[in-house]
Image: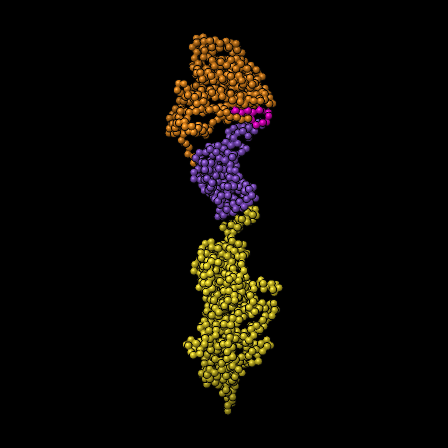
Chain colours: A orange, B yellow, C purple
């Protein structure tokens, strides 16, 4: 049955009022934070000390740690004549108990372009059918979507290795999303194992000389806000600190940086990430971030870029990343986003058709071997019925 | 069996419509220029062969725009040709006349049986009663087809009168059938009627089954002549048939082109009846009072004498009595008239008008010989008469003499026929006689129709073994009752639509032929149709020349026209 | 055996079908191409492409808004990216076992594995079977670009037949077309003019 629009309509007034109130609240919070930034722009030591204090009292702390004055703006250097960009993106087929067979596929798309060479970029797809056993958990349930996503993140980085031969330096690799692998941590053995492998890959990438970064478009992170919150908190506050009822909640970091980064290619101050997960990365790989204006003149568009520690320590490398990312985003014209990442995403996407195809393949193989195959659940069956009314009329 | 060479004639089209009453429509599958109006075609369908004439050709298109558009310029040449091949077409209108069972495959036993039946004429072409199927194949007639219908040359009464337009196949006419009814040869002046007549007469004479009496008004048939256009000598019947043909001159001492005739004809006064004179009403411009006068003469003097008496009456003969009063001479016309109760003026007028007859040198009281009997004997013996009018070739003499003779001869034939029919001892069947008259419209027009023997003969339809062969250029002036009694008509080009209409009188549903008649080639083409002709056909008439005579008399194998022309050095 | 695409079937019926697929620019199918769709071991459907619809490609549209598109990006799009294409195919006949029929296929594709461009041999076999019966399927629907479709088909088929030594196929095909369209002046002239362009 269609949505009862009348019901919705009745609620709209109230809803709008709530939104308006909240926006106002957030605006005032943002103003507060901006004031704090202004005030504490150079007082890095104070801020770091605050963090240490807070961390001691509140182990679950997540916030940014400044490495440069808060209001730093670094403009972008010129682009080298020749450089390599690689992107990897993944998508997955999650197992479903409603389907005929349970299976899980992680599909990674890879694109490598040597800018300045005039050559056609290399495109590759790597598809992994997960071990049947790995789909099922010891407790009887099926592997969660979150876990699959984690494995996917890992696969993306691992896949980068497969295309990282004969690199024309400087070489930059990127994936969509943070480096930190921030996921609901289930302290399972599986998670730990995966995480270890992940760190391993990052190290390998670094050994290869690949400048690795994570790219976040429309960043919703509030790590800077969380940092500045700490300033006005007493010890008691800190002890009772809960991440779930924060002072500056709702204000996103990107809004704080917006007015600072006006020129295309400008980056903000560099921050390190402080979190239980981040600590496990170690110094060399510790995730850092900065904000970057990838938009064209007059129309700033900020993205958040995460890099490992060893890159963060090198301003020249940071500048290179600025230039490359801005250029990649400019290729997309009015909606700036790194071209190569988009392509990797395109390559990685699994269509419905392909999903079905894989399922057919598996079912056929099972049939051949006499392995029993379930029926689709009727719930799924009916969901799958075509709802459109198209008719072939030539 | 077949004397005819294998022809290459293949299919020229196929039937797409039409019917029995309207004509058949055929789609032409060969270029239009290869078929002409008048072409003789054969349609094979079911177990039948249909024979017909092409009477019209029409251009058509599946859509008129294909015909309008200059598709030739807008499309590449090859495409345009393909397109036109399918969208532009020519239709034939075919008048079917005969159909015949198609025989089995040659070489089989059934074929021999069938062929025998054909020879015996138990299987023969018959009038069309049905139609061929859609898409039945149409082809040009081959020599064999023509021979099937019109007979094989040299066989019996079949005489080659000409050739088909397409293919030049010989076409024969059945001479026996030709003379079973009165027939006509028509055509505008200069279309070669006389040549065609010579051909037919030669055939008849050569066949020898019928006797021919020719009233040769212009000395065309008997003696040799010169062709007006080519200047070549044209052999005459006398020349070629010698003793078979008797040349008779009119009037004692008559000569024919400087030559002596075989004998001369004089007409006795006693032979002339009042009816003979009445026939000349128009020619002599006789008054309405004439019949009365003539009747009175007959009553007074009798059939045998009236003419003689009347001739010798005086005119403007007066005597004077004692008082000096004038009174008609008793030997005068006036005197007789008064005595007979006839208006003297009328009688005198008649007398004056008959002067031409009175003065005719060939009308005598006592003819030197009984030429009439001589003529009859000749005809009985299988000889033929050409009556030459010599210097008496004006209309009046022609009318008078030909009518009178014909009357006399016909009377004899009637008498003999009656005797024969009632089984009298020693009575034998009269020999068929054809009387050939030219300028027939002078003898057979509406006004004269009731008066001449000719119309009687025409209407009698050979009741007494006498038929006419009339030759004329104005058939519209011939009494249509007479025209409708004609059997075979052979006609060349006619310019006048009334004449065309007249030729077709009495033949059912021949509208299609009117157009064809109008479009005949003068001098070359004639249309032959009517009773005695299995179906109408356009032919190129046979040439009357030395080669013709060789073929006819020396009985050589008939050559086709091409060979003849070759030999003549064309 | 060059498969055009493994695509998804958008719409299908007895007279034809539409597939959506991604196709590399280099071996993309062309308008008027003869294609075959194997459906069962002994049964395949033949059709002709009468519409190729390039769907809106968001990326390309976006690229156009940028000032300068680098060479590598151009090449990437030209050679690597498969264009989203809707290919509409008109059914022309089918092959059952060894026999080819120019009738509408009794069983249309219901799911699609792949469609193939016909090889020259397959094209010769299909277009020589019978007497151009498949023309009527092309001519049936006036809403399709009949003239252009026939011209494209004729051009291709002619080349293939003549290469194989058969010079009579093309004139015979034209004759058949003329016969079929004799009563439709406008359409016939359109087709012939289009054919005239081929020469």
Q: Residue at position x 38%, y 27% from top?
A: A377
Between B191 and B376, the residue placed more toward the observer is B376
* The C terminus of chain C lies in quadrant: top right
Residue C74 location (% of width, % of height): 56, 29
**Above or below for B210 versus B101:** below
Residue A26: say if magenta: no
Residue A120: say if magenta: yes
**Above or below for B466 versus A267:** below
Q: Can residue B556 be seen by looking at this rendering?
A: yes
**Above or below for C91 versus B329:** above
Q: Residue lying at the far top in this picture: please name it.
A: A235
Q: Residue at position x 39%, y 20% from top?
A: A140
Residue C109 location (% of width, % of height): 44, 36
Which residues, given as a range, are shown in magenta?
A: A109-121
Residue C157 location (% of width, % of height): 53, 41
Q: Can residue A258 be seen by looking at this rendering?
A: no
Between B520 and B196, the residue placed more toward the observer is B196
Q: Residue lying at the far bottom in this picture: please name it.
A: B322
Residue A385 location (% of width, % of height): 40, 31
Between B292 and B39, the residue placed more toward the observer is B39
Tell me how many marks there are.
0
Q: Residue at position x 58%, y 67% from top?
A: B547
Between A42 and A80, the residue placed more toward the observer is A80
């Amino acid at each position: 049955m269609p949505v009862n629009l009348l019901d919705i309509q009745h609620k709209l007034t109230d809803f709008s009022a709530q939104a308006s109130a909240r926006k106002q609240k957030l605006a005032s919070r943002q103003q507060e934070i901006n004031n704090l930034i202004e005030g504490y722009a150079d007082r890095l030591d104070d801020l770091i000390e605050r963090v240490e204090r807070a961390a001691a009292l509140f182990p679950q702390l997540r916030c940014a740690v400044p490495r440069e004055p808060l209001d730093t703006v670094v403009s972008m250097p010129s682009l080298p004549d020749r450089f390599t960009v690689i992107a990897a993106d993944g998508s997955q087929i999650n197992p479903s108990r409603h389907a005929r067979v349970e299976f899980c596929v992680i599909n990674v798309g890879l694109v490598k372009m040597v800018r300045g060479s005039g050559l056609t970029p290399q495109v590759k797809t790597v598809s992994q059918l997960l071990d049947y056993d790995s789909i099922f958990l010891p407790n009887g349930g099926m592997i969660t979507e979150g876990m699959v996503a984690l494995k996917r993140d890992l696969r993306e980085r691992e896949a980068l290795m497969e295309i990282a031969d004969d690199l024309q330096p400087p070489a930059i690799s990127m994936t969509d999303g943070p480096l930190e692998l921030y996921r609901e941590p289930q302290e399972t053995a599986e998670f730990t194992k995966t995480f270890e492998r992940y760190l391993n890959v990052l190290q390998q990438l670094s050994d290869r000389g690949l400048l690795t970064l994570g790219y976040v478009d429309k960043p919703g992170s509030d790590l800077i806000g969380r940092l500045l919150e700490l300033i006005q908190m007493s010890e008691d506050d800190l002890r009772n600190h809960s991440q779930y009822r924060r002072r500056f909640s709702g204000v996103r970091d990107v809004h704080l940086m917006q007015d600072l980064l006006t020129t295309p290619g400008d980056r903000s101050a560099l921050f390190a990430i402080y979190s239980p997960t981040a600590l496990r990365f170690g110094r060399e790989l510790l995730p850092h971030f900065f904000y970057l204006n990838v938009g064209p003149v007059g129309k700033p568009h900020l993205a958040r870029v995460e890099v490992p520690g060893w890159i963060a320590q090198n301003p020249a490398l940071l500048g290179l990343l600025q230039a490359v990312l801005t250029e990649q985003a400019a290729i997309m014209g009015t909606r700036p986003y790194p071209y190569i990442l988009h392509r990797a995403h395109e390559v990685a996407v699994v269509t419905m058709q392909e999903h079905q195809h894989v399922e057919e393949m598996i079912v056929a193989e099972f049939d051949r071997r006499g392995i029993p195959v379930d029926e689709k659940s009727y719930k799924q069956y009916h969901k799958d019925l075509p709802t459109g009314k198209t008719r072939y009329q030539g | 069996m077949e004397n005819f060479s294998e022809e290459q004639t293949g299919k020229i089209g196929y039937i797409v419509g039409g019917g029995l009453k309207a004509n058949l429509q055929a789609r032409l599958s060969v270029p239009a220029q290869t078929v002409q109006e008048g072409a003789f075609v054969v349609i094979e369908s079911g177990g039948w062969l249909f024979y017909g004439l092409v009477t019209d050709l029409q251009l058509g298109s599946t859509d008129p725009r294909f015909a309008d558009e200059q598709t030739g310029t807008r499309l590449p040449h090859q495409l345009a040709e393909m397109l036109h091949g399918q969208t532009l077409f020519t239709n034939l209108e075919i008048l079917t006349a005969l159909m015949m069972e198609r025989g089995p495959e040659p070489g089989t036993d059934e074929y021999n049986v069938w062929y025998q039946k054909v020879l015996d004429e138990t299987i023969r072409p018959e009038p069309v009663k049905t139609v061929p199927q859609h898409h039945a194949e149409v082809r040009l007639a081959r020599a064999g087809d023509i021979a099937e219908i019109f007979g094989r040359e040299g066989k019996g009464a079949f005489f080659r009168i000409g050739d088909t337009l397409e293919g030049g196949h010989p076409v024969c006419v059945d001479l026996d059938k030709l003379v079973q009814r009165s027939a006509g040869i028509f055509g505008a002046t200069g279309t070669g009627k006389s040549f065609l007549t010579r051909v037919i007469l030669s055939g008849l004479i050569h066949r020898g089954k019928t006797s021919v009496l020719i009233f040769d008004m212009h000395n065309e048939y008997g003696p040799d002549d010169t062709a007006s256009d080519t200047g070549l000598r044209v052999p005459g019947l006398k020349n070629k048939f010698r003793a078979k043909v008797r040349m008779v001159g009119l009037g004692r001492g008559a000569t024919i082109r400087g030559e002596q005739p075989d004998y001369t004809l004089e007409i006795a006064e006693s032979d002339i009846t009042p009816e003979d004179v009445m026939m000349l009403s128009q020619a002599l411009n006789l008054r309405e009072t004439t019949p009365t006068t003539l009747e009175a003469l007959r009553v007074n003097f009798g059939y045998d004498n009236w003419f003689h008496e009347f001739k010798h009456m005086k005119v403007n003969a007066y005597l004077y009595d004692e008082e000096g009063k004038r009174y008609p001479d008793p030997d005068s016309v006036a005197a007789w008239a008064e005595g007979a109760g006839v208006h003297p003026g009328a009688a005198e007028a008649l007398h004056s008008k008959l002067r031409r007859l009175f003065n005719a040198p060939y009308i005598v009281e006592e003819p030197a010989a009984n030429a009439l009997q001589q003529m009859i004997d000749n005809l009985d013996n299988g000889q033929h008469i050409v009556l030459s009018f010599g210097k008496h070739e004006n209309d009046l003499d022609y009318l008078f003499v030909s009518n009178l003779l014909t009357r006399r001869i016909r009377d004899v034939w009637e008498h003999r026929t009656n005797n024969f029919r009632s089984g009298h001892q020693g009575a034998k069947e009269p020999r068929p006689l054809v009387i050939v008259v030219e300028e027939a419209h002078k003898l057979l027009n509406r006004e004269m129709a009731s008066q001449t023997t000719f119309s009687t003969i025409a209407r009698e339809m050979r009741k007494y073994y006498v038929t006419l062969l009339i030759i004329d250029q104005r058939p519209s002036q011939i009494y249509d009752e007479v025209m409708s009694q004609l059997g075979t008509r052979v006609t060349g080009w006619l310019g006048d639509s009334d004449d065309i209409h007249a030729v077709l009188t009495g033949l059912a549903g021949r509208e299609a032929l009117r157009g064809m008649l109008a479009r005949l080639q003068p001098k070359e083409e004639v249309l032959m149709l009517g009773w005695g002709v299995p179906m109408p056909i356009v032919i190129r008439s046979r040439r009357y020349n030395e080669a013709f005579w060789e073929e006819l008399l020396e009985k050589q194998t008939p050559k086709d026209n091409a060979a003849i022309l070759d030999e003549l050095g064309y | 055996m060059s498969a055009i695409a493994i695509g998804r079937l958008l719409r299908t019926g007895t007279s034809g079908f539409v597939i959506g697929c991604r196709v590399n620019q280099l071996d993309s199918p062309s308008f008027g191409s003869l294609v075959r769709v194997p459906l069962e071991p002994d049964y395949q459907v033949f059709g002709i492409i009468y519409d190729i619809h390039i769907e809106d490609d968001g990326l390309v549209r976006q690229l156009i808004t940028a000032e300068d598109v680098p060479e590598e990006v151009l090449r990437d799009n030209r050679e690597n990216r498969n264009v989203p294409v809707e290919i509409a195919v008109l059914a022309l006949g089918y092959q059952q076992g060894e026999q080819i029929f120019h009738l509408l296929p009794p069983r249309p594709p219901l799911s699609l594995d792949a469609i193939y461009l016909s090889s020259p041999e397959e094209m010769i076999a299909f277009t020589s079977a019978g007497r151009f019966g498949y023309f009527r399927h092309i001519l049936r629907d006036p809403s399709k670009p009949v003239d252009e479709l026939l011209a494209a088909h004729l051009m291709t088929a002619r080349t293939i037949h003549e290469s194989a030594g058969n010079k009579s196929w093309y004139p015979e095909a034209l004759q058949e077309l003329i016969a079929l369209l004799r009563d439709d002046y406008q359409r016939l002239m359109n087709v012939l003019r289009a054919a005239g362009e081929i020469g």
